[in-house]
Amino acid sequence: MISDIPPPPTEKRSAPMIRVGVVEDDARHRHVLVDYLDRFSGENNLTLKVHTFEDGAELLEDFRPVYDLLLLDIRMQGADGLATARAVRAVDSDVVIIFITSAQQYAINGYEVSALGYLLKPFPYTSFAREMNRARTVLERRDRAAITVKNGADVQRVPVGDIVYLESVGHRVDMHLLDRVISQASTLKDLEPRLAPHGFFRSNSCYIVNLKHVVGVREQDSVMSTGEALRISRPRRKGFMQALTEHISGTRQ
């Protein structure tokens, strides 16, 4: 059973997790950022899952919208930070971007890619923590969109952004998250109206997909951020493509 009610007061909740991508071609600055992230994590009881990239090309090589935050150097060899951010925004309108720069004028075009802010090298930890707290506020506001999943006596609160898709399997529904699968006795028909307001679309009789995690459409399949290809039924294809276009443009209600 899934509902939109808040979790019961007795439910134990682990420290929030934030997925961070660090894109910096200078090894010294990259290490500083990782050290700062480790310190910020400890001071704020946060779990940070950090991945580092030596340049924008490495990030974009197999990019999927799985990050909550990108710390992105602007001046890099090859694809610079702004070009990288444009490519990221083409498939992920939600990730928070903070630019890292050695000259303030290079961050002036950050509005083009809806960057939250920037840090001017060399920056002290206090400046870094201030930007991280701003990012955390944005992410926590988003995380209020969550559903509770009840499976037997176990109740879990699941942020809707972590749900990649739901699959009907016999008399149960499997909820495929970024890092695990939760099964419950339910039907897609029951869940669809509860998830639709959060950017989900029923692509066929077996799947409800999170449009945030759709990274492409290949023939009759939607390609998900996890690399899976899920069939789009012919009668639903037109509606699916319209919903996906509205989601990407930010006009979907």
Image (cartoon, grey):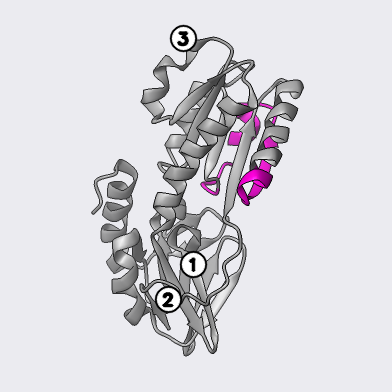
The residue where tag 2 is placed is: 206
Can you say which quadrant of the picture contains the N terminus?
bottom left
Q: Residue at x 31, y 59 (%)?
A: 240
**Front-most of 94 and 136?**
136
Is residue 54 covered in magenta? yes
Q: Position of residue 199 (x, y in %)?
A: 34, 58
Can you say which quadrant of the picture contains the C terminus?
bottom left
SS type, badge 2? loop
Disc nearest the viewer among 2 and 1: 1
**Front-most of 193 and 243?**
193
Start-end of magenta stretch: 41-66
Residue 102 visible in the shown view? yes
Mark 3 crowdedness (10 Å alpha carbons): few <14, some 14-19, many ≥20: few
The residue where tag 1 is placed is: 158
Relative to 78, say whether 174 is above or below: below
**What is the spatial separation of the Cα atoms under label 1 and label 3, in whole angstroms?**
40 Å
Q: Disc 2 marks which amino acid?
A: Cys
Q: Earlier in the sequence, mark 1 or mark 3?
A: 3
Q: Position of residue 220 (x, y in %)?
A: 41, 60
SS type, badge 3? helix
Q: Disc 1 marks which amino acid?
A: Val
SS type, badge 1? strand
**What is the spatial separation of the Cα atoms under label 2 and label 1, in whole angstroms?**
21 Å
Q: Earlier in the sequence, mark 2 or mark 1?
A: 1
The residue where tag 3 is placed is: 105
Q: Position of residue 136 (x, y in %)?
A: 49, 43
Q: Position of residue 13 (x, y in %)?
A: 57, 67
